[in-house]
Image (spheres, coloured by chain):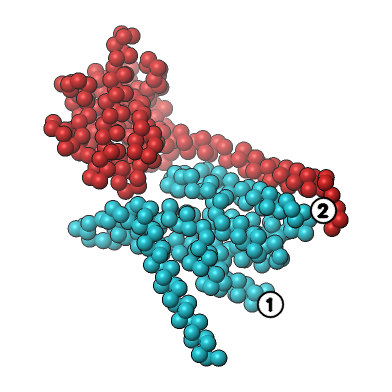
Chain colours: A cyan, B red
Amino acid sequence: MSLKKDAKKIFKKGILYDNPILVQVIGICSALAVTNRMMNSLIMGIALSFVTAFSSMTVSLLKSRTPRHIRMMVQVLIISAYVIIVDIFLKAYMPDMSKALGPYVGLIITNCIIMGRAEGFAQSNPPVLSLLDGLSSGFGYTLVLLSISLVREILGFGTVFGVDVMPQSFTKWTLMVMPPSAFFILALIMWAAYNLRIKKEKEGVEKK
Amino acid sequence: MKKQKSFTYPIIFMTVVTAFFVSILSTFSQATKDTIAFNNESELRYKILYIFDILPESKNPKDIEKVFNERVEERLAGRKNIYVLMDGEKEVSYAVPVEGPGLWGTISGYVGLNEDFSTITGIDFVKQSETPGLGGRISEESYKEQFRGIDISNSQDGKFIVSSPQSGSNVDAIAGATQTSSAVEKLINEDLNDFFDELEVKQ
């Protein structure tokens, strides 16, 4: 029962209150780079969720045996192992996707979310909770990426997941295809999320 | 906890953990090596067949491999590795590799030529890292299809491909991607010239 409760709390935190991109503002480099198409964002999000979840779990499993002063080294090793697995998997079974994401799969290693979760959560929590925590952060990341890419793909290509949705006469926005547009959209989403949060907090205070 | 402060424990620990992950990774990589190699090969095969305009209906890599093995031969011409399309014993057309700098990185691909080098039959790019949606559109059908059946027998000064808006253009440039369009024009013209020069010396 308590695990269920904890899990619920962790997911709420990862997706809403502590959303890695909107609230902590980490890991946005890839959020800017791969969000021009929804499919890319989805695969990237799944890959990152997988890596975060399993590296957090592994870090947590090894934490009592890891000497504190070399823990960063161990974490990087674990993270890179999982990233290489994802990279090889994509190359072997989804070659088109692997081409579309290009170097960004390998760069998951440097994504601050993974290291952040390993340091901030997995280091002091049991393996199962760490796994869930990694997953929730990954989902939070994926949702933001998907919402950015939804706007970018509709305006930039006139499609959603590669399916045409806009009328033929629609003029595609070249800007939306290029990385700078992600800055604008990400900022708008952050702004909306921030206002929502403030509103919620105010309501909470009034209730008390 | 005391042993964790020792000098040797971290080294041993790190070695064990590394060995563990390396063994997992190498097993996994070994298991998928053939699939990855096959993927890369079938992508190239698909592109060569596209250039010769003899793509089979099905996009199944196995079918593509079959057609490729039946009709295409690889050969060294000058210093370049070219692909030759055979019709029985006769050579019908050639796919010549071209390469040059694009806007962001190297663009490389193949240009198809007919048997007497008078017509370009098609083009495809093997590697390009142009801006997606702009220069990256050189990989789209609508751009590549323009290169079907371009007569180059009367080209002057080795200008086989002339991008719009220059006068006498035979290929439409991509709007908003002028640099990529002229890079493609330049790399095709230069490499085809090299290729012809080399062959004429040899012939």
Relative to B89, A18 lies left or right = right
Q: Amino acid at mark 1?
A: Ser
Task: Decide: is B110 above or below A21.
Answer: above
What residue sits 33% from the left and 14% below the top?
B198
Name the residue that disc number 1 marks: A2
Counting every numbered tag in the picture gives: 2
Relative to B18, B83 lies left or right = left
**Where does the N terminus of chain A fall, quadrant-wise?**
bottom right
**Residue A94 visible at all:** no
Q: Tag 1, which chain?
A: A
Disc 1 secondary structure class: helix
**Where does the C terminus of chain A fall, quadrant-wise?**
bottom right
Mark number displayed over residue B4: 2
Residue A73, x across and y down, in percent: 68, 49
What residue sits 41% from the left and 68% below the top?
A189
Residue B100, x across and y down, in percent: 35, 30
How many residues crowd around disc 1 within 10 Å: few (fewer than 14), some, or many (20 or more)?
few
What residue sits 64% from the left and 50% below the top?
A76
